[in-house]
Image (cartoon, rainbow, N blue to C red):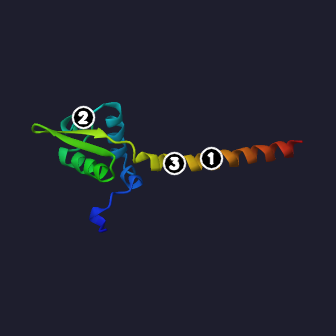
């Protein structure tokens, strides 16, 4: 499979703060047209469209045409991979903090 046919990595897609904000906006609304999304940023329509394209390539955003307007909505399922990765490290840090706490308690005794 060539690089052009592969889905973009969701970690790569959410690395940019603008794209994370787009995800948040779409999570708060059922569906938003491009002009409403663009109004939330201090950048032009083309720049917002480029960010949306990256999110679409990662499967995080779906779009549909309604007349002359393109409307976007969130598809959060690719974020499961991110959640699973974070969950692993949450357990890692919880376990290590518990161990540290136990060691400190033992030293106090």
Total tally of numbered discs in the picture: 3
Mark 2 is surrounded, within 10 Å at the Cα level, by few (under 14), some (14 to 19) or many (20 or more) other residues, namely some
Mark 3 is surrounded, within 10 Å at the Cα level, by few (under 14), some (14 to 19) or many (20 or more) other residues, namely few
The residue positioned 85% from the left and 45% from the top of the image is 106
Q: Position of residue 23 (x, y in %)?
A: 35, 41
Q: Position of residue 93 (x, y in %)?
A: 64, 48
Distance between the alpha carbons at the discs numbered 1 and 2: 36 Å
- Quadrant for the N terminus in the image: bottom left
Q: Are marks 2 and 3 in contact (CB under 8 Å)?
A: no
Q: Is residue 79 left or right of residue 45?
A: right
Q: Which mark is residue 91?
A: 1
Q: Mark 1 or mark 2: name the one nearer the start of the chain.
A: 2
Q: SS of the residue at dot 1? A: helix
The residue positioned 27% from the left and 44% from the top of the image is 62
Depicted 80 relative to depicted 71: above or below = below
Distance between the alpha carbons at the discs numbered 1 and 3: 11 Å
Residue at numbered disc 2: 32
The residue positioned 59% from the left and 46% from the top of the image is 90
Mark 1 is surrounded, within 10 Å at the Cα level, by few (under 14), some (14 to 19) or many (20 or more) other residues, namely few
Residue at numbered disc 3: 84
Q: SS of the residue at dot 2? A: strand
Name the residue furthest top.
Answer: 29
Q: Position of residue 107 (x, y in %)?
A: 85, 46
Q: Position of residue 21 (x, y in %)?
A: 35, 40
Q: Mark 2 or mark 3: name the one nearer the start of the chain.
A: 2
Q: Mark 1 or mark 3: name the one nearer the start of the chain.
A: 3
């Amino acid at each position: 499979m060539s690089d052009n046919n592969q889905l973009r990595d969701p970690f790569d897609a959410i690395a940019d703060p603008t794209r994370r904000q787009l995800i948040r906006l779409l999570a708060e609304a059922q569906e938003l047209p491009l002009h409403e999304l663009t109004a939330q940023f201090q950048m032009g329509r083309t720049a917002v469209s480029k960010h949306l394209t990256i999110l679409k390539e990662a499967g995080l955003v779906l779009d549909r045409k309604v007349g002359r307007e393109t409307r976007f909505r969130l598809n959060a399922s690719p974020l499961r991979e991110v959640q699973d990765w974070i969950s692993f490290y949450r357990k890692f840090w919880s376990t290590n903090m518990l161990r540290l706490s136990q060691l400190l308690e033992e030293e106090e005794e």
